[in-house]
Image: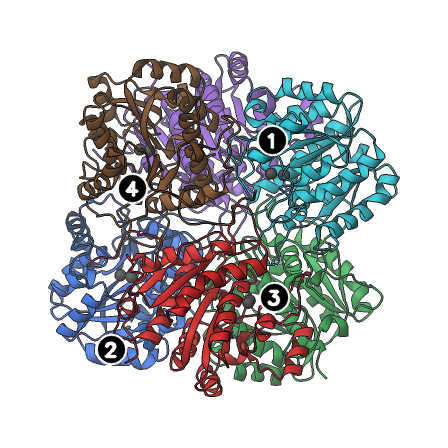
Chain colours: A blue, B purple, C brown, D red, E green, F cyan
Amino acid sequence: MSRPLLRKMTFLGLSENPESAKIVFLPAPYDATTSFYPGTRFGPRRIIEASPYLEFYDEETDCEVYQKAPFLTLPEEELPIAPQNMLEELKRRLKPYLERNMFPVVLGGEHTVSLAPIEILAEKHPGLCVVQIDAHADLRESYQGSPYSHACTMRRALEYGIELFPIGIRAISREEMEFVRDKGLEIFWAKDVVFKPHSIAQKISQRIGSRSVYVTIDLDGFDPSEVPGVGTPEPGGLKWYDALVILKELAGLNVVGFDVVELLPADNRSPFFAAKLIYKFLSYLFCRI
Amino acid sequence: MSRPLLRKMTFLGLSENPESAKIVFLPAPYDATTSFYPGTRFGPRRIIEASPYLEFYDEETDCEVYQKAPFLTLPEEELPIAPQNMLEELKRRLKPYLERNMFPVVLGGEHTVSLAPIEILAEKHPGLCVVQIDAHADLRESYQGSPYSHACTMRRALEYGIELFPIGIRAISREEMEFVRDKGLEIFWAKDVVFKPHSIAQKISQRIGSRSVYVTIDLDGFDPSEVPGVGTPEPGGLKWYDALVILKELAGLNVVGFDVVELLPADNRSPFFAAKLIYKFLSYLFCRI
Amino acid sequence: MSRPLLRKMTFLGLSENPESAKIVFLPAPYDATTSFYPGTRFGPRRIIEASPYLEFYDEETDCEVYQKAPFLTLPEEELPIAPQNMLEELKRRLKPYLERNMFPVVLGGEHTVSLAPIEILAEKHPGLCVVQIDAHADLRESYQGSPYSHACTMRRALEYGIELFPIGIRAISREEMEFVRDKGLEIFWAKDVVFKPHSIAQKISQRIGSRSVYVTIDLDGFDPSEVPGVGTPEPGGLKWYDALVILKELAGLNVVGFDVVELLPADNRSPFFAAKLIYKFLSYLFCRI
Amino acid sequence: MSRPLLRKMTFLGLSENPESAKIVFLPAPYDATTSFYPGTRFGPRRIIEASPYLEFYDEETDCEVYQKAPFLTLPEEELPIAPQNMLEELKRRLKPYLERNMFPVVLGGEHTVSLAPIEILAEKHPGLCVVQIDAHADLRESYQGSPYSHACTMRRALEYGIELFPIGIRAISREEMEFVRDKGLEIFWAKDVVFKPHSIAQKISQRIGSRSVYVTIDLDGFDPSEVPGVGTPEPGGLKWYDALVILKELAGLNVVGFDVVELLPADNRSPFFAAKLIYKFLSYLFCRI
Amino acid sequence: MSRPLLRKMTFLGLSENPESAKIVFLPAPYDATTSFYPGTRFGPRRIIEASPYLEFYDEETDCEVYQKAPFLTLPEEELPIAPQNMLEELKRRLKPYLERNMFPVVLGGEHTVSLAPIEILAEKHPGLCVVQIDAHADLRESYQGSPYSHACTMRRALEYGIELFPIGIRAISREEMEFVRDKGLEIFWAKDVVFKPHSIAQKISQRIGSRSVYVTIDLDGFDPSEVPGVGTPEPGGLKWYDALVILKELAGLNVVGFDVVELLPADNRSPFFAAKLIYKFLSYLFCRI
Amino acid sequence: MSRPLLRKMTFLGLSENPESAKIVFLPAPYDATTSFYPGTRFGPRRIIEASPYLEFYDEETDCEVYQKAPFLTLPEEELPIAPQNMLEELKRRLKPYLERNMFPVVLGGEHTVSLAPIEILAEKHPGLCVVQIDAHADLRESYQGSPYSHACTMRRALEYGIELFPIGIRAISREEMEFVRDKGLEIFWAKDVVFKPHSIAQKISQRIGSRSVYVTIDLDGFDPSEVPGVGTPEPGGLKWYDALVILKELAGLNVVGFDVVELLPADNRSPFFAAKLIYKFLSYLFCRI
Ligand SMILES: [Mn+2]
Ligand SMILES: [Mn+2]
Ligand SMILES: [Mn+2]
Ligand SMILES: [Mn+2]
Ligand SMILES: [Mn+2]
Ligand SMILES: [Mn+2]
Ligand SMILES: [Mn+2]
Ligand SMILES: [Mn+2]
Ligand SMILES: [Mn+2]
Ligand SMILES: [Mn+2]
Ligand SMILES: [Mn+2]
Ligand SMILES: [Mn+2]
């Protein structure tokens, strides 16, 4: 067997069978820009087109996860500009697959797109927890006049009644900090996570317990040295193995979906990083014995 | 009506109807490289993903060509490495559409891929002429041990019995030049084309007459100032309006297909240039009254 | 005398005297993006910081224009996000200078910012003409839900009662074309301008006659080979000397201001091009005998 | 409150009040290059223009430092070419602010610019210590014929009678090494600092004691993976959290000023890193209770 | 003494004396690409041209290694395209120097080039061990129809009877994994090496014992944050100090040569990293007392 | 015959015979920068390494010029920093070849390096004319304190008694303009050359007549769309075919040498342009019948 040159726009470039698929990839190519210029709307396809260059076998789990849990990659369809309409449309697309109990992986686009899977899953799984990897808290009430800015995503998500576990935060406003204190939220700061990822991962894991959990990964949560392709390159972020520690721990919980968002694909290695991160997490999730 | 954000991987990002389509786009993502690094194998998808940013209406022909001649974009499927197998596979994919008399637009990939449509069309249209826009003659007998190198494409094409009209050439070897003289080929040198595109276009047009013609466009035929994304940036190439003059003239002939090849997509404007060139040529071809 | 290393953020990097200044530069760093990533909001400062690298003497007019008509560069102040508020703020800033009859040069930012000077000047100079250099007509009624998108700028400008002369257009929608025909607008297409800039410049000049004229220069009107730093790199645009022909002709009219917009500064030469274009136009305007 | 789009060329983009300011930023855009091409002379403005994208609140100190110690950003004025004249000019600009006991932050430019603040402060604070973060010792007697090359900065600084603490060094010449041994200087090599930043920071802190200290940060002291925008990308440098450990320790001492130099701003993340580093250090320094 | 501006194409840019040289650098600029575009064939010269910017003195060993073991840099000569011919040619070039017992440093080029020194040295040093730093196992039987692909290098090397120690692997196919298990090979996975480089280095060192060892360094073994210039940027790779630990340990063994391959030089810091890595390893090897 | 992969650092990558060579290439890798960062000192080697990708046969002259006039490429040797010493060193290197009546081609480096060949040739060929292609007059008396700045090169050259023909100028200071008028120099402005290259070429040719002529080509004389790799990208420069017209005309005169300088090699196509320009000029010069 040889690795492919290039294949169609599916994750790994595989031929897919919608009937047997267990994992569904939903591209959410949403940002506000209209020019033909790198923006987060190109994120989903850059991740997908990096994916066939992954080694399909994962040595850590001794497994090719797409064989255990076959993939279905939805096409990139046009999205409305208005954020609420965009979210309605994403939910409309996701629903049939969630009804068939498929596992969703959403590819952004702006962080705002995460609200679509979170809202559906919060309804479906009462007590849903959301683990957020991000440099920013995204807890503003509104930003630049909009309550649906990517700087407000987690504030909106809280309104669905979820419990939030923010990891890797290292840029937060005074107002967000006051909100955090008011609500008794606990933030797992980047400066702590990078020195003791295991103990923080375990602490979060214990607090979530048997509840369902959705994981939202804003790529700016990672260190810009490893993922330069983001809008605000905050130094001091998570490294590759920090994330693996966390994702491996979370894989022991009842994870019901995840997303990877905010890729601003101006270089080659950031999309590759994102694709491998997704594949690793899926391997941890679906190759357990 | 508004232009889309991003849509699926079809030309213009349109929803397509295979039944009514008259024009078929065949991606041929073929090059020899295996790393995840810009190569001509990324050419087809970079052209396709630039295409939704085109204005769909063409003011010169007062027409939206996709409505006159609906599009069908074939998916990117894996291609064999060995050039002959690759060509067989491309021919296999093209044939059903040519049998339905659809108009093929092949997107490369290395120039070698052009041999697939040329071979089929040469069989189907006896006396087929090939107009080649290129910086290089591609007339070597073999190159680096391979008779299927992109430096040999037109030498191979001649073996199918076609008549060749090379335009924009400005890099040729002594051996190729001897072959040209032996065969009585006429080359339309770049240095002449850029000063008198009209008269050269007309001369070619008259010599082709009522015969069928296939047009193969190696993007390095253009000046690197306008299309920097090529492997060998030979100065002194065709400019945008030179090409329009030629393509408009050719549109008056019996054109049976064309390709655009050798895009090495390391910048944003080269894919956009290629997409607009394709759309312009299609407008000239299918919006005539 | 030597050219400076780097100076403060004024045009040419000069020390300025607000009292004696005749030309006022207004930076309008407006776009919708919020990340620290190249966007048109960086346009004004990239033009200003390229300007000290210009030769201050212009050999064509035998003149250093800043000595004939001293400069004042306004600081970059924060702008509101909502387009109407942004325009109010720009007008508020411009007004005191226009009341003193200073000549405004607005530096964008999105094309939308042009509406501020156009509105004030249309009031001040009844019968104001607007010459627009652009790849796009910008005549949509609304775009992506907003009547203030940069794709609608000239549609809005027409509502102020101005007469419009669009130059260099090569991307237009069917709807815009219908509007153009309804209104009896004449468009000076790129494909004509690049072959006969003189005759088109004279035709426009004669039609404007003694009326006041404002010139709005969207940098995507230029060919992307010369100005790669734009959002949609439409091939076939104006070249440097085409623009000089037009600007020289316009300099014979009653020009009351101009702007240069839509610079997306990801390279070094586009800002330099913009800065020299501005300086050339000012030399033509203020160094006439 | 929302983060700004873009603001004027002050640190954080704030409106400033010279009367109440306690911290003064002095841009020192000095290098030897004369072309319009990325050079360290663009360092100061790239740092300043990244700064408004910082979160103004620092969660570690629970503080917005600009409110405790208001900022004043001096304009970028032309500097002489000859290094001694340049230093005289920088000292002339700094003096009035140092006389008012403001805290200076110098933004380079070549490392040579550090000699201006060091000389003034060495006079003002007898026994001044200088902590240098750098990949290079900068202890050459002269370099390429000049005693004021950036390769000689610390050799010159020693002549002002300061005590030097070089951190992060990993490129040194035999001659410099002999000088180091002669003078009994202690170098804190990069290979040690990255494995035990705490103990080295404490050792330096104890040796400085109650003396005044100036910190000069050559950005090439950092690992090129985190700060790629430097002239010689020596692997094995300090990482973000190594620097925070050191700066936090130093913040407990009597720090009288600092600089950040040698940014060669060809990418987006290096200026952002520099801006955040400055803001972090100021937070540590001025938000202590 | 001052560092040079630029010098001739020798390692460090030194004037060399073939008579006294002990270390021979062999450029192996081999890849399959034919365009003038960054490829691994540019690797050797980019490493060589970065090398004069190294500090010649190494503080860790207190030594200038080129004085202890003088250098000879062979010129870049044309190589045949066919891999077996290429390897024959490289062996032909290496042999006279190995006969004089010079120490070879091969600069790639594709990983395939390593087979030339390995084959000769395996003959010369029975029981030769090969330590491989790489992201990939390179143990495929054949790849894309070729048994000499860079994905097969170590499979071929094993056929010369060497013992293999692969370090840093993090991408392997199921087929390779089965081969590994069949042969009882031990792989030192990246995820282990980055957390305990010392113990792994010692384990390898003990297993090699007094046997001769050749070290082949595929630069993609390093983390792409430190060496972005590779074809497949697999996250989770070795960092600078991990490599130093390993190379220092290996320097205590009987090392008979090494290579550095697969540099895809699209940035400035990857070649610098490679050059410094080579110089460090040579310092460890030849400056021991 | 096939084109090479890569060869040694000679022009075209050829094996050379110093005995029979008629044309000598002298690399002059001189600029003021000391970091490992693109600068004009990398110009010579980037031109040389692009050259093997040229087609060796020139169709316009039906000739492979290196066979008519064999090449010798001198190695890149270290140059002194002080400009006068650097010039002495270059002259020292050139002299033996000029004594053997070889034809010199100097590759810069800063424009200052041209003074070495000009001075020697002015002595050897009384009445020497210098044709300068440049965006700048380079006629300042001194610049930034140095009479040997690249902004002063032609002022110095005039002191050797040569007659100067500046072509393509479009940036000049008032002081230079006064000097031009004082001396009765004629400048062939870019804005004229690009519209009538033939008549200007002939005019210059007639004025030079039978005198010897040296041609100095500052690459910023070209339009930045074709040669982006220069320090100050002045729009409105010469295009490829403008230069060919001029060089072809000059080839009919008694040309005694030429240089190509000021390449700042940050892209791939500028070095290729320079290499092909050199080869074209040599073909015109040495393939005449
Ligand atoms: Mn974020
Ligand atoms: Mn977020
Ligand atoms: Mn070609
Ligand atoms: Mn071709
Ligand atoms: Mn436009
Ligand atoms: Mn516009
Ligand atoms: Mn340094
Ligand atoms: Mn330093
Ligand atoms: Mn590898
Ligand atoms: Mn390998
Ligand atoms: Mn010049
Ligand atoms: Mn010059």
Horizontal and vertical percent position of residue E241: 53, 75
Q: Give the Cα separation between the discs numbered 4 and 2.
A: 39 Å
Residue D151: mark: 3
Residue F178: mark: 1
Q: Nearer the viewer, residue F270 or A121?
A: F270
Secondary structure of the residue carrying numbered label 3:
loop
Residue A34: mark: 4
Quadrant of res E71:
bottom right
Residue C208: mark: none
Q: Of discs 1 and 4, which sits in the foreground?
A: 1
> In this orientation, does residue B141 appear?
no
Q: Are marks 1 and 4 in contact (CB under 8 Å)?
A: no
**Label 3 Cα crowd, 10 Å radius (few <14 / some 14-19 / many 20+):** many
Q: The residue marked by circle 2 belongs to what chain?
A: A
The vertical placement of C169 against E262, above or below, is above
Q: Give the Cα separation between the discs numbered 3 and 2.
A: 50 Å
Q: Are marks 3 and 2 in contact (CB under 8 Å)?
A: no
Residue A204: mark: 2
Secondary structure of the residue carrying numbered label 1:
helix
Residue depicted at x 69% and y 40%:
F2
**Label 3 CB sits under 8 Å from any ligand 8 atom:** yes
- Please report whichever mark, 4 or 2, sits nearer to the chain's N-terminal start: 4
Q: Of discs 4 and 2, which sits in the foreground?
A: 4
**Label 2 Cα crowd, 10 Å radius (few <14 / some 14-19 / many 20+):** some
Q: Nearer the viewer, residue B15 or B100?
A: B15
Q: Nearer the viewer, residue F52 or B69?
A: F52
Quadrant of res D60:
bottom left
Q: Nearer the viewer, residue A237 or F104?
A: F104
Q: Of discs 3 and 2, which sits in the foreground?
A: 3
Residue depicted at x 16% and y 57%:
A142
